[in-house]
Image (spheres, rainbow, N blue to C red):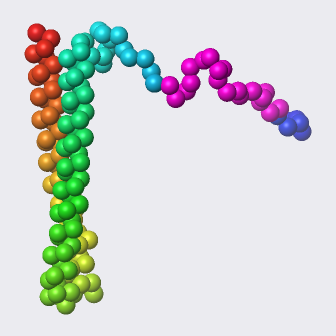
Amino acid sequence: MSDEAPEPPARVRVTAPRAGGPAASARPEARAPGEAGAPTSDIQGVYVRSLIRSQLRIGLVFAAGFAIATALFALALAFTPALDETFVAGVPVSWLLLAVGVYPLALTVAALYVRAASRNESRYRSLSQQDRA
């Protein structure tokens, strides 16, 4: 066994990209029609943009709906003083409902969102297949 320490790896010089070269943050070039994942026509691009917008709209609607429903649930608990006077294992029932009751709401909203998004995507697929035919 040798008492010598292993040699460190060779140093590598890291430099900025050249002024004329492509920047790391530059957008990739559009795919050519016919490549995997590329729109085959202008109408395909319109369909994709429409799908993205509708998916965003659905997501925002469901997020706002969840926030409003959660706020209403908390307000309903706040305006029911009898729940604050009832205790289970030393914790007020209103706190337990608030801690546990939001999860079924979140799961319901998530399931409804997935259903709506899947329906949206199946409509897109049927439109894009009709356009190709």
- The answer to whether residue 110 is visible is no
In the image, farthest residue toward the right:
3
Q: Residue furthest bottom?
A: 85
Q: Residue at x 23, y 12 (%)?
A: 41
* Residue 67 position by quadrant: bottom left
Q: Quadrant of the N terminus?
A: top right
Q: How many marks?
A: 0
- Left or right for 17, reference 77: right
For the point 25% across and 40% down, the residue is 56
Q: Quadrant of the C terminus?
A: top left
Residue 43 image offset from top left, x and y in percent? 20, 17
Give 23 or 66, whichever is nearer the viewer: 23
Q: Please tell me which residue lies in front, 124 or 112.
A: 124
**Which residue is found at the position 19% from the left and 51% from the top?**
62
Numbered range of the magenta stretch: 7-26
Magenta span: chief secondary structure: loop
As displayed, is residue 108 above or below residue 122? below
Image coordinates for residue 71, horizontal then vertical, percent: 21, 68
Choose top left, top right, bottom left or bottom right for residue 84. Answer: bottom left
Q: Is residue 10 visible?
A: yes
The x and y percentages for residue 127 are 12, 21
Q: Name the foreground residue: 95 vs 18.
A: 18
Work out whether 2 lies above or below 79: above
68 sits left or right of 19 in the view: left
Residue drawn at point x = 17 percent, y = 46 percent: 113
